[in-house]
Image: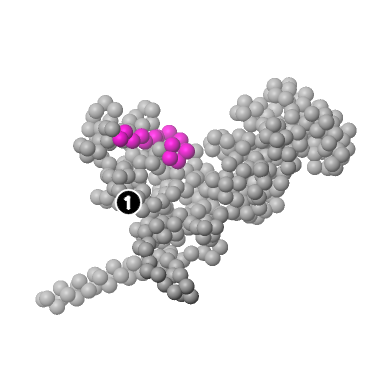
Amino acid sequence: MKRIVKLAAVAVLCAAFLMGLIATANGAPANVYLMAVNDRPMEMTAENMPMMAGGALYVPYTMLSSRATTINLGVSAQYNSTRRTVLVSSGQQGVVFDLQANNAYDIRSNPLDAHAVVRNSMVFLPIMWLCNYFGSINCTLTRTNYGTLVRVTNSAVVLSDREFVDAASSQLADNYYRYLASIQPASTPTPTAAPTARPTAGPRPSATPTPSEPLPGERAEVTLAYRWGDQAAEAARLLENASQRALFLFTPEELAANDGLVRRLAAAGHTLGLVLTGETAEDCLVQAEEGASLLAAMARCPLFIVEAPALNGDGRAALEQAGYVLWEPHLRADDYGSAGAVMRALSARRINRVELTCDGTGLDLSRYLWSAMTAASCRVYQATAPLLAQAGD
């Protein structure tokens, strides 16, 4: 009988070992949780990494704090260190997690079947329970090569989970390896000739930057222009969901044919500009005057920014002397095969001017590019006449 028990115990241990090997072979450590809010990866450390407790998934309250994430999900969490409570509120509903009493109640003091967990001085909240309670936020789990991605989203999210994982893979990898480095015990001195061992918890793509290397396009400064196309309204919606505005460019003919869209863009606070197709400064000046009159009549806004791709330096100077500011993109996203290629092309200049086209392909590229720029902490500015004139280059 004892032999049978021993054999059973050995079998269990072997099965657990094999499951660990399978998880490592699949490249997704089951005990590591990465984090993202909408289309932005969040920094994961040993102190704030999500965890399972009592069969429920818990995330740090900071994932619901707009101060910590700079993203307003419509459901926010605030910690009161004096009372040792966390208030999670949507404006209409609210839940108070009392850390001292280890209970929860709504804003009318009705008890709720939930509680928070404290680990390493960080407060963790039951995210699936909160999603069900409020209904306006969602939480998904996605296996990646670097662990399980916990992603909290609302209706403003742009990318699907798989699209996000593809677009932010380098940032997720970088976060994962920083986490591994932070939990590694201090090693004893080794001879200088000995190679440094790499973590073996999962494969690391050779193209992934090391933590000491800057990510492609990291912290670049960007202004965006969208060339008119049949997806212009959807491009504007994506921008507005991200609390951003951009420059939209029309030819005079496109301007005249899209008065409703032009008014909608102007009302939303986007900048409107004109693409001048003339081959001489005289022709372009005539087009600019016609476009300025159209904009004034349609949207009650002035025309300051123009693009004149056919003109040489003297022609562009003539437009500037007439009071116009020229939009000249440093790169056109259509010339690059992916958002990653666009990010790698961004330089250290004061402002990178990037132009996209509002067609189906350009819109897909725009979605990935927004995620990549967010992950790389790019600073995105609205293209206005004063900003373009100041940048100069």
Q: Is residue 286 magenta?
A: no
Residue 83: x %, y % from top left:
27, 32
Query: Is residue 315 shown above or below 17?
Result: above
Residue 391: x %, y % from top left:
70, 39
Local SS, label 1: strand
Instruction: Judge the density around disc 1: few (<14), some (14-19), many (≥20) Cα neighbours within 10 Å.
Output: some
Q: Nearer the viewer, residue 372 or 62?
A: 62
Quarter of the N terminus within the rendering: bottom left
In percent of the image, x 48 and y 58: which residue is there?
173
Label tally: 1
Say whether residue 254 is left or right of residue 188: right
In percent of the image, x 25 and y 70: which residue is there?
13
Kindly give the residue lying farthest to the bottom in the view shown.
Answer: 3
Kindly give the residue lying farthest to the left in the view shown.
Answer: 1
| Display colour scheme | one colour
In percent of the image, x 56 and y 63: which residue is there?
207
Say whether residue 223 is left or right of residue 195: right
Q: Is residue 68 magenta?
A: yes
Q: Is residue 128 visible?
A: no
Q: Amino acid at mark 1?
A: Met
For the magenta stretch, what is the residue range? 67-81
Residue 285: x %, y % from top left:
84, 31
Q: Nearer the viewer, residue 262 or 170?
A: 170
In percent of the image, x 66 and y 53: which residue is there?
345
Find disc 1 in the rendering and name its residue.
Answer: 51
Q: Is residue 189 visible?
A: yes
Quarter of the C terminus within the rendering: top right
Residue 213: x %, y % from top left:
55, 57
